[in-house]
Image (cartoon, helix red, strand yellow):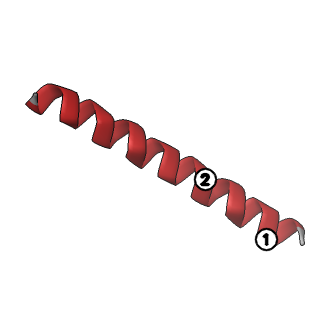
Amino acid sequence: MAAFEREWAAALEESRRTLSLGGLSAVLQD
């Protein structure tokens, strides 16, 4: 269970980083 939670937290963190990067590049391209 702990390993699953750790993986879930890591996936959330990575998706959040990707989203913020995507939003930043969208702003720069605009």
The reply, left or right, for residue 30 in relation to residue 14 is left
Amino acid type, label 1? Phe
The reply, left or right, for residue 21 in relation to residue 13 is left
Residue sitting farthest toward the left: 29
Residue under numbered circle 1: 4
The reply, left or right, for residue 26 in relation to residue 18 is left
Q: Position of residue 21 (x, y in %)?
A: 33, 39
Disc on the earlier residue, 2 or 1: 1
Residue sitting farthest toward the right: 1
User: Looking at the image, which residue is at 40% across and 37% down?
Assistant: 20
Q: Which of these two is toward me, 30 or 12?
A: 30
Q: Position of residue 27 (x, y in %)?
A: 20, 27
Amino acid type, label 2? Leu
> How many numbered marks, from 0 up?
2
Residue under numbered circle 2: 12
Measured in 3D between alpha carbons, the distance from the residue under mark 2 to the one under mark 1, in whole angstroms, is 12 Å
User: Looking at the image, which residue is at 45% across and 43% down?
Assistant: 17
Q: Is residue 11 above or below residue 22?
A: below
